[in-house]
Amino acid sequence: MTNMTLAVSGDLHKIMRKHKEVKWSEVARQALWQHARKIELIDRLLSKSKLTEEDALDIGRKIKLAVAKRHGLVQ
């Protein structure tokens, strides 16, 4: 198994020190696995897509504009 060093904020470090009963390395390992699985799923879904990155950005812009209009943020 490979070791990894993480930097955490002072506030988080205080909480971690306060709760020594928690296996923080296991919490981090599980969070990393969860995120990695999401990325792998996205990769599998996108591998079959014919959209270009520019197409995806354009769709994203249109969705954001429609949402903003729906909520009265733009006309």
Image (cartoon, grey):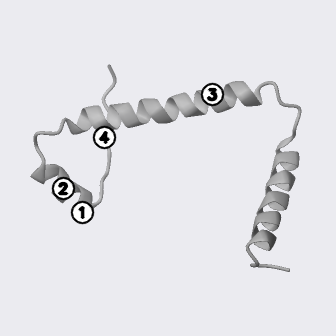
Find disc 1 in the rendering and name its residue. Answer: 11
Q: Is residue 66 above or below residue 56?
A: below
Crowdedness near tag 3: few (<14), some (14–19) or many (≥20) residues, C-alpha within 10 Å = few
In space, the residues marked 3 and 2 are separated at their CA atoms by 33 Å
Q: Is residue 25 above or below residue 68?
A: above
- Expressed as whole percent of the image width and height from the top left, the position of residue 67 reads 76, 65
- Expressed as whole percent of the image width and height from the top left, the position of residue 72 reads 76, 78
Numbered circle sitting on residue 15: 2
Q: Secondary structure at mark 1?
A: helix
Left or right of 36? Residue 31 is: left
The amino acid pointed to by label 3 is Leu
Q: Is residue 49 above or below residue 19?
A: above
Crowdedness near tag 1: few (<14), some (14–19) or many (≥20) residues, C-alpha within 10 Å = few
Q: Nearer the viewer, mark 2 or mark 4?
A: 2
Numbered circle sitting on residue 41: 3
In space, the residues marked 1 and 3 are separated at their CA atoms by 33 Å
Find disc 4 in the rendering and name its residue. Answer: 5
Q: Earlier in the sequence, mark 3 or mark 2?
A: 2
- Expressed as whole percent of the image width and height from the top left, the position of residue 12 reads 25, 57
Are the residues at dot 2 and dot 1 in contact (C-beta closer than 8 Å)?
yes
Quarter of the figure that contains the C terminus: bottom right
Crowdedness near tag 4: few (<14), some (14–19) or many (≥20) residues, C-alpha within 10 Å = few
Q: Secondary structure at mark 4?
A: loop
In space, the residues marked 4 and 1 are separated at their CA atoms by 18 Å
Q: Is residue 1 above or below residue 70?
A: above
Residue that appears at 82% across and 44% down: 53
In space, the residues marked 2 and 1 are separated at their CA atoms by 7 Å
Q: Nearer the viewer, residue 14 or 1?
A: 14
Left or right of 5? Residue 46 is: right
Residue that appears at 59% across and 33% down: 39
